[in-house]
């Protein structure tokens, strides 16, 4: 089901933020054209034969790849023709770079007043930090989110790219709003976001806590308020609990672990929140006495909110994940079947979004340029000059 089948998106981005936003639009059915430099393309392409690394596959499904050197006048002229027949353009560069390349909002929106021009930066279009380079960890740190996730002296950082992907998701939301408005106004919009702003909006809980209370949210405050725990079982595997605020789940846990004394000692959320560390230590001792499978059966029987902590390999084979059809497989020429993730949205029950695999570098250049009216001879001439 391609809800955006009549929308064409130009992805001029590299790395994650803009490509991720473009990929999300592609999963909704948009025709996404990834415009890359001849020879190298997106830096996340790690292989010289144009195949794609896992990180490239993660953010570039459902796209067509066109190689085009738009830093040259001949290439910029081709890009202008693409802009003229497109609905959305996404770019993630520092302020001032788009103007130097001739792909700034003012010029391109003059060519196509219906264009939704989307600019992603690290810190916003101006201000004291605007010209600084920014990648995922920079956004995490500046937004305050990293302070909620990492409090040890270990200089290593775990986890996926969070600031990057949240920024891409935020921009996708902005694109959809601008396209909806355009149905009535007939005019495009300049849509902007930054890694700083998008990640800060994602970190809304601790920020609002500070704004309301004038103090930093305690590091484990969310866990204590939600009665959330990560516990290691006798077999070394971990299990997660999240009782939230209803007392019934706490009482159910006490029954599941045969510890009615805990329900009597901590009868309400306030008492449990105050004793969070004490309860955590007690639960750690209890759960260390049985293996995870045993605890899972008991918790499910008593209707306690829980989940095993799964590895990525376990997630891929999990019965619920398989039942929902979360993953897909798309044939990639030169690689074979490549597994990916279907969109997390269902429309009339349909979540399928494996329309295209990740493209080889320049795989669709001739196809797209032909759609613009260029002849084979013209395309061959531009290729000979290194323009496409």
Image (cartoon, rainbow, N blue to C red):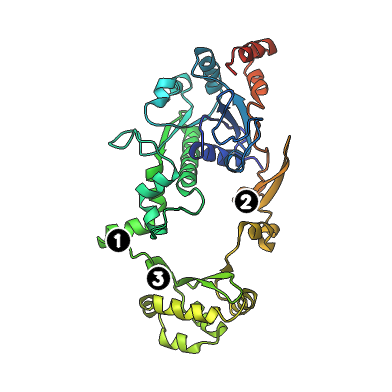
Question: Nearer the observer, disc 3 or disc 2?
Answer: 3
In the rendered image, the vertical position of residue 265 relative to residue 344, given as above or below: below
Mark 3 and mark 1 residues within 8 Å of each other at the beta carbon: no
Vertical placement of residue 75 versus 264, above or below: above
User: From the viewer's perspective, is 4 left or right of 100?
Assistant: right
Q: Secondary structure at mark 1?
A: loop
Answer whether residue 41 is visible to the viewer in this image. Answer: yes
Mark 1 or 2: in front is 1
Query: On the image, numbered disc 1 is attached to which residue?
Result: 216
Quadrant assignment, res 236: bottom right
User: Quarter of the image containing the C terminus?
Assistant: top right
Q: Count neighbours of disc 1 (C-alpha within 10 A) and say few if under 14, some if 14 to 19, many if 20 or more.
A: few
- Asked which secondary structure carries label 2, the reply is loop
Residue of label 2: 346
The tag earlier along the polypeptide, 3 or 2, is 3
Chain-order first, disc 1 or disc 2: 1
Looking at the image, residue 311 sits to the left or right of residue 159; the answer is: right
In the rendered image, the residue lying farthest to the left is 214
Residue 174 point in image, percent of width and height: 46, 40
Q: Nearer the viewer, mark 3 or mark 1?
A: 1
Give the left or right position of residue 252, taking residue 47 as reference: left
Q: CA–CA distance between discs 1 and 2?
A: 38 Å
Q: Which residue is mark 3?
A: 225
User: Between 14 and 255, which is closer to the camera in this rendering?
Assistant: 14
**Above or below, 359 relative to 388:** below
């Amino acid at each position: 089901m391609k809800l955006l089948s009549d929308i064409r998106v130009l992805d001029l981005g590299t790395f994650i933020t803009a490509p991720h936003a473009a990929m999300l639009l592609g999963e909704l059915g948009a025709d996404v054209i990834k415009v890359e430099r001849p020879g190298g393309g997106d830096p996340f392409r790690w292989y010289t034969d144009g195949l794609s690394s896992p990180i490239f596959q993660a953010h570039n499904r459902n796209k067509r790849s066109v190689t085009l050197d738009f830093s040259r006048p001949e290439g910029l002229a081709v890009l202008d023709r693409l802009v003229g027949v497109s609905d959305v353009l996404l770019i993630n560069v520092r302020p001032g770079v788009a103007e130097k390349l001739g792909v700034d909002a003012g010029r391109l929106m003059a060519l196509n007043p219906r264009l939704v021009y989307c600019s992603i930066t690290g810190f916003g279009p101006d201000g004291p930090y605007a010209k600084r380079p920014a990648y995922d960890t920079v956004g995490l740190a500046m937004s305050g989110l990293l302070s909620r996730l990492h409090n040890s002296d270990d200089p290593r950082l775990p986890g996926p790219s969070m600031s990057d992907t949240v920024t891409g998701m935020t921009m996708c939301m902005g694109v959809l709003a601008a396209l909806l408005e355009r149905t009535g106004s007939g005019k495009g919009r300049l849509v902007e976001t930054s890694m700083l702003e998008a990640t800060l909006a994602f970190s809304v809980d601790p920020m609002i806590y500070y704004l309301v209370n004038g103090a930093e949210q305690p590091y484990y405050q969310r866990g204590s308020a939600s009665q959330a725990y990560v516990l290691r079982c006798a077999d070394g595997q971990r299990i997660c609990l999240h009782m939230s605020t209803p007392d019934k789940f706490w009482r159910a846990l006490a029954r599941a672990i045969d510890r009615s004394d805990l329900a009597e000692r901590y009868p309400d959320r306030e008492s449990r929140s105050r004793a969070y560390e004490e309860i955590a230590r007690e639960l750690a001792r209890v759960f260390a006495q049985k293996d995870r499978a045993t605890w899972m059966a008991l918790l499910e029987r008593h209707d306690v909110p829980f989940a095993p902590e799964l590895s990525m390999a376990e997630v891929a084979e999990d019965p619920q994940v398989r039942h929902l059809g979360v993953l897909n497989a798309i044939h990639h020429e030169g690689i074979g079947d490549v597994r990916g993730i279907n969109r997390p949205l269902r429309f009339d029950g349909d979540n399928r979004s494996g329309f295209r695999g990740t493209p080889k570098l320049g795989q669709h250049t001739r196809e797209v340029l032909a759609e613009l009216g260029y002849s084979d001879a013209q395309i061959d001439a531009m290729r000979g000059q290194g323009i496409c």
